[in-house]
Amino acid sequence: MSVPIERPPRKDPQRVTRPPELPPTERSRASLALSAAAARGGFSMQVCDACGAVAYPPRDACAHCLGRSLRFRPVDDGGEVLAETSVQTSPNLYFRERTPWRIGIVRLDSGPSVVAHLHGDVTVPSRIRMILRLDTGGNGVLMALPAGRESENMADDPQMRELVADPKYRRVLVTNGRTEVGQAVATALSRAGAETVFVGVAEPWKPFAGQEALAALPGIAMVPLDLTDTDSVKSLAGQIGGKTDILVNTADHARPGGLMADGAAVTMRDTFDVNVFGLQRLAQHFGAGMRARGADGTNSAVAFVDVLPVYALASTPDYALYAASAAARHSVLQALRTELLAGGVRVMSIFTGPIEDEWHQAVAPPKVQPARIAKAVVAALREGREESFVGDIAEDIAARYRDDPKVLERELRV
Amino acid sequence: MAKYGSPRRGYRDVAVAVPVSIPYERYSIETAHWWIARALEKLVEGAGIESGDIDGLSIASFTLAPDTAVGLTQHFGLSPRWLDNIPMGGASGVVALRRAARAVEAGDASIVACIGGDANQVDSFRRLLSSFSRFAQDASYPYGYGGPNGSFALITDYYMRQYGVKREDFGRICIAQRENALTYPNAVMKKPLDMETYMAARPVADPIHLFDCVMPCAGAEGFMVTTPDIARDLGLAHANLLSTIERHNAFPDDPIQVRGGWAMDVDELYAVAGLGSDSIDVLETYDDYPVIVMMQFEDLGFCAKGEGAEFVRQHDLTNTGSFPHNTSGGQLSAGQAGAAGGHLGLVEAIRQITGRSLSRQVPDARTALVSGFGMINYDRGLCSGAAILQGEGA
């Protein structure tokens, strides 16, 4: 049974912060596809189109039939662990700081033998359930968990915690407390064990709906934050940037209209100011601090989460300006993912369909309830998932996007 | 037996001579080129020839990059008509020998110098690991980055569970080899090892502890392959090559390695040599970790699978014991100089069966078996080989 982690003590300012190191990051192209599968979540392995054999390590030709068409598909996650070791010494700085590190050889029911991280609750030999997760270097790795039901404190296993961004004991900033989405996310993170949830509120002298319920939650701290104001972002980062372990940007400026509508230029500028420049301001003023604290103990900096519309992947005529800002936002997140990688800080994109709020009244259902988004944020953190799609519309668009973006572009016209 | 093709042909006219060892250094600023050149120089001296007489060159090294054996011809001013580069680590000595032997038999070369040598600068080992193989990079190193220690720890853990082997059984191998090493002047390890010290060593990757691991060094080993006629003309003590085997990626469906390629080919090894395992006077196995030594005892027919530990308990593995094994101390006590480690046993065997031993001479040693094993590409060693040689004895 996993030992529960302890609440981290207040940081000793005299102590040198451990510099973030990464596990080995080099991968072949075939293995990058394993990482992509891990980024999306679920358990997938390379399967040969010609003979159906499951292949591992990822390769360019099937060892059973020499077929070259190998694709990642969901496969049975069961297996048996045959052998284990605890690595006590490593020339790699990341592992050297984290020894002993437990690994094992697992015979998967789907065929291959694999080297995998072993959860502390796994005994050898025994049946296991394999999961695919991203390591702090952003690459897909396998971890064996005990087969059967989850045991208590399983998420507190130190090797497990390295592979996810669990909010337990961490300090979170949710950027917009004025919206239902922001409030739902803050509430969910407080319930998920976050130590503190800072909630950004622009123009704090103006009261807002839901304010009292939010303030009554444990660990909530309202902070002034206006993403369109560089000084405001900078000032807040000065106060809490050194203790922001998870940042969730829920800011969203959604306005209907096309490129030729009256006042489109002004609307577009306002939309970009919140959705794109706001994100860049957060990245600039909070990013460097988070990157430096990627290995700072139990409450190290772990994730930068952005909730953005799924129209980042393809435009929708009714919200052309908004979709353009979402596409820019998506691109900013990709860049940020690379910039924060050196600190092992994950960037997570939560793509949503139209939200059930005042700015999507004219949009036909199904629409996404704020609580659903909050649940997806917590799940993404607990699974270390890089991309999540929330709601039927977002999932539908994601599936069509993966199939053929040019077809999707046409489908969204009608 | 393969589905197609004819049975393996034995060797008629292959002599193996001039064993050379360049004493190892733990760390050295010298390059692989330097170590290999030193071994070649010693081989030329020992053979009483000029370097221009070498018309075949076989090189094994992990640290020559960006060069290969090709670059060394110009670097050393050699113009060989036969050239080989063996990227097989611990199997490189046996593989170099069997390829060179066929070249000499066919007349493609007359005097082949086979050299394994590597540099070991302070950061070499770390850099070598990071560029070892694609599968290791993708699917082994991201898991604790234990290098070969981690991989062999998993193999050892399974082998111990499967066959009821105790750490003490591996200790017997390591302790006997240390005793042998104390008689070999080039051995890096100079202190005796007892069971208490062996058992008390710090864990490196459980169940592997410090004395189960080799010490990476810089150094070189080499030997010459030629015809018996040329060897006699040059007045060189030599051994005759009787039989060899080589196998890669054997038993790919074994979920975890419990045997090497020897188990596939061992009958042919003895049949071609025209003798059995009971005729072997000296055995030199590849010993980067003791578990693989035990597997070789089994797979080379000295005992059945799973009986390696009992075999070790029943035999004295020292040079004057009932089963002389790794008579210069093996890599566990002599040190591992990269690909030279794949040549160490072969060089020692030539010395023992030609009566030129630097370590304590095994009494009446005439027939030797040398085995090689190498390249943990992902979760197991892929290359294995073995050779039987016979000499005139002391």
Image (cartoon, grey):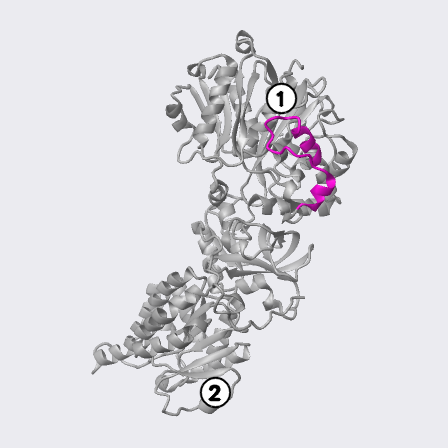
Determine if marks 1 and 2 fall on one subunit: no
Residue A318 shows up from this direction: no
- Which mark is in front, 1 or 2? 1
Mark 2 closeness class: few <14, some 14–19, many ≥20 residues within 10 Å = some
Q: Is B177 covered by the magenta stretch?
A: yes
Which chain contains the residue that carries disc 1? B
Image height of B139 relative to B344, above or below: below
Q: Is residue B4 left or right of residue B65?
A: right
Give the farthest residue toward the front.
A14
Residue at label 1?
Answer: B358
Q: Which residues are magenta?
A: B175-201
Task: List x then y, in percent, for residue B159.
Answer: 69, 44
Residue at label 2?
Answer: A214
Task: List x then y, in percent, for residue B243.
Answer: 62, 22
Q: Nearer the viewer, residue A356 or B51?
A: B51
- Report, in whole angstroms, how far the alpha carbon at label 1 lies from the one at label 2: 82 Å
Label 2 SS: helix
Q: Nearer the viewer, residue A119 or A50?
A: A119
Which chain contains the residue that carries disc 2? A
Task: List x then y, in percent, for residue A139.
Answer: 47, 57
Q: Nearer the viewer, residue B344 or A401?
A: B344
Q: Are marks 1 and 2 in contact (CB under 8 Å)?
A: no
Q: Is B43 covered by the magenta stretch?
A: no
Task: List x then y, in percent, for residue A121.
Answer: 66, 62
Q: Amino acid at mark 1?
A: Leu
Give the farthest residue toward the top.
B233
Image height of A85 relative to B223, above or below: below
Q: Amino acid at mark 2?
A: Leu
